[in-house]
Amino acid sequence: MIKILGFILTIGGAIALVLGVLSVFGSLNVGLSPWALIILGIVFFFAGIGLLKKRNDTDET
């Protein structure tokens, strides 16, 4: 379960990061502040990578 959440956070962070960078340097308009997308993308991307690296995927409680 943890690896699935880490994978989703990593993919979502990468998408937000790409959209934010394209909004800042290109002509892409997503309706949100591009700097907010970049910051959220960085946070989600590194949180997902951290979950994938540090946690074992066990179902034991």
Image: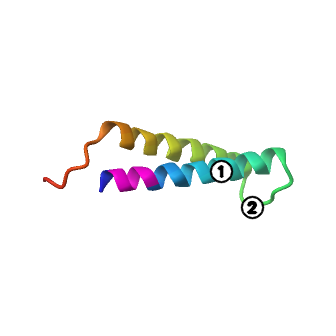
Residue annotated with mark 2: 30
Q: Is residue 6 left or right of residue 60?
A: right
Where in the figure is residue 55, as x and y percent of width and height?
29, 41
Q: Is residue 44 visible?
A: yes
Q: Mark 1 falls on what kind of element?
A: helix
Q: For the residue marked with disc 2, what is the amino acid? A: Val
Q: Quadrant of the N terminus?
A: bottom left
Q: Are marks 2 and 1 in contact (CB under 8 Å)?
A: yes
Q: Residue furthest right?
A: 27
Q: Which mark is residue 25?
A: none
Q: Mark 2 falls on what kind of element?
A: loop
Where in the figure is residue 10, as x and y percent of width and height?
49, 48
Q: In the image, what residue occupies the spot 77% across and 49% down?
A: 22
Q: Which mark is residue 37?
A: 1
Residue in the foreground of this view, choosing between 8 and 44: 8
Q: Is residue 36 visible?
A: no
The magenta-colored residue range is: 3-7
Q: Looking at the image, tell me whether mark 2 or mark 1 is earlier in sequence order.
A: 2
Q: In the image, what residue occupies the spot 75% across and 61% down?
A: 30
